[in-house]
Image (tube, rainbow, N blue to C red):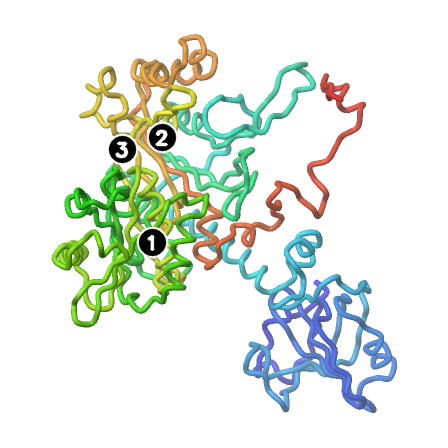
Amino acid sequence: MLRTHTCGELRLENVGKEVTLAGWVQRLRDKGGMLWIDLRDRYGLTQLSFEEGITPADVLVQARSLGREFVLRVTGNVIERESKNDKMPTGEVEIKVTNLEILNPAKLPPFMIEDDTDGGDDLRMKYRYLDLRRAPVRRNLELRHRMMRETRNYLDNLSFIEVETPVLIKSTPEGARDFVVPSRMNPGEFYALPQSPQTFKQLLMVSGFDKYYQIVKCFRDEDLRADRQPEFTQIDCEMAFVTQEDILNTFEGFIRHLFEKVKGVTIDQLPRMTYADAARYYGSDKPDTRFEMRFVELNALVKDKGFKVFDDAELVVGINAKGAASYTRKQLDELTDFVRRPQIGATGLVYARVNEDGSIKSSVDKFYSSEDLQEWGKAFNAEPGDLLLILAGGTDKTRKALNELRLEMGERLGLRDKNTFSPLWVVDFPLLEWDEEAQRYHAMHHPFTSPKPEDLELVDSRPGDIRANAYDMVINGVEVGGGSIRIHDRTLQEQMFTLLGFSKEEAENQFGFLMNAFEYGAPPHGGIAFGFDRLCSLFGGSDSIRDYIAFPKNNSGRDVMIDAPSSIADAQLNELHIRLKG
């Protein structure tokens, strides 16, 4: 090694030792007779000191020639600092340098390598290898490492086996778009990069590997946002000879283990909520339960009073923003503008304040008596100082809009603390969802999800009412994992493909290998996959998964550091039998 110690480990007990450190110049302070340099490596910072008349002259000359991010190797003696810095672990000591070697000079970096940098997102992504030197970014990747280590520890202790599945697979029509890879040796044919290892992990259950996991790269060619990347990482798991209850208990234990070992947070037993209740009370299949503000349906109280907006609505529903009656007209107008945004889609907002004397004043007083408004207050369990916010319209659209308003109010009222964690299971999803445009059903999860046994009789008569043996884990309004008990019977799997509009030939062509495997003794099985990048960002208190990926893509799916994707040479295209239009 070129060093005896790292830049983060020296303490008072090391005073008097001769040590050798190696790292990057963080900053220099030249006071004429004294010169100090902060030397940085992955482990921390150590202050180096140089003094006129004591430090060898050639070493002092070298030190004064240094710039930021020069790579150094220094030798010297550990001494106690006269002016201690309690904000850094090594702040009680410094190195009195006797020898200095420049291992590599450096150009002036395009932004400050500091915790609070002056570099914008685009610039830091272009020079990501420099951004990775910053302590906050390094800490994010250290958190990711700890989470990966504790994931393996937990699953290894339960006799799970880690198995790698193929990266070059067959393209399938369901789900998001595949990334495709042309095959040189099979002209005109293509592999796909896996969106998940779903069918392979099911085949592993058929093979007798009854507890499988993999921390695996997956790929989806979809529109991007803060919590999506074209390539992402899953904790992918499957178990055989289990019920839904077994899976929920196993992976509830897993998430509690991660919180305890990585965050030092104790999580109580996870509550369970049906999909129907999540939609009715929160307008979302991933409710943020850090705060109450549950939906209250008002149809029975507000219709047939002459207010056309409510009379014509399929659903009138609202929330109680506790303590927000003091909102000004300007703030209420802002909320109205918020719900009218195209991405939310409400036509307007009705509000009612609960005054200190218990009376209620609304924006639609001319249609409702004070007695009517008191009934509203009872429905919301309202108290003086509360603000009631009400939307009306089609059921699904109104619930979705009110969910957005609820989250906005939670943010404004300081109820969405990133250091508070509220995980839960959402269960009993619909098996299928109807696509009006395509005039057919799609699988809510995927085509291999098993229906609830008690709902099988609805397959021919009311397929839209069938509930799935499926479950999602939600933390703070973010879906971090989802899975299901799988179909393990060929006949039922064929029925499922028929419901989804597959012809027999299409089903056989796409998934014949799996259905054939079911005929050789497939055990009952199920599993779950966690979005590992999302988990890391949640644990780290960030809204973007990019902060927890070493080399992420931008919102256009580009790696601006290496300039990818890029065009390829005509010779390569010819070899792959690909002709570009134009």
Residue 168 spot, x, y in % from top left: 57, 26
Q: CA distance from mark 3 to mark 1?
A: 38 Å
Decide if residue 239 is in sight here.
Answer: no
Residue, disc 1: 406
Foreground residue among 212 and 401: 401
Residue 414 spot, x, y in % from top left: 37, 65
Residue 444: mark: 2
Residue 306 spot, x, y in % from top left: 20, 45
Looking at the image, tell me whether mark 1 or mark 2 is earlier in sequence order. 1
Q: Say left or right for 301 vs 519.
A: left
Residue 345: quarter of image:
top left
- Badge 3 marks a residue whose secondary structure is loop
Q: CA distance from mark 2 to mark 3?
A: 22 Å
Looking at the image, tell me whether mark 3 or mark 1 is earlier in sequence order. 3
Residue, disc 3: 242
Residue 526 position (above or below residue 125): above
Decide if residue 455 is in sight here.
Answer: yes
Residue 26: quarter of image:
bottom right
- Badge 1 marks a residue whose secondary structure is helix
Foreground residue among 221 and 403: 403
Mark 1 or 2: the one toward you: 1
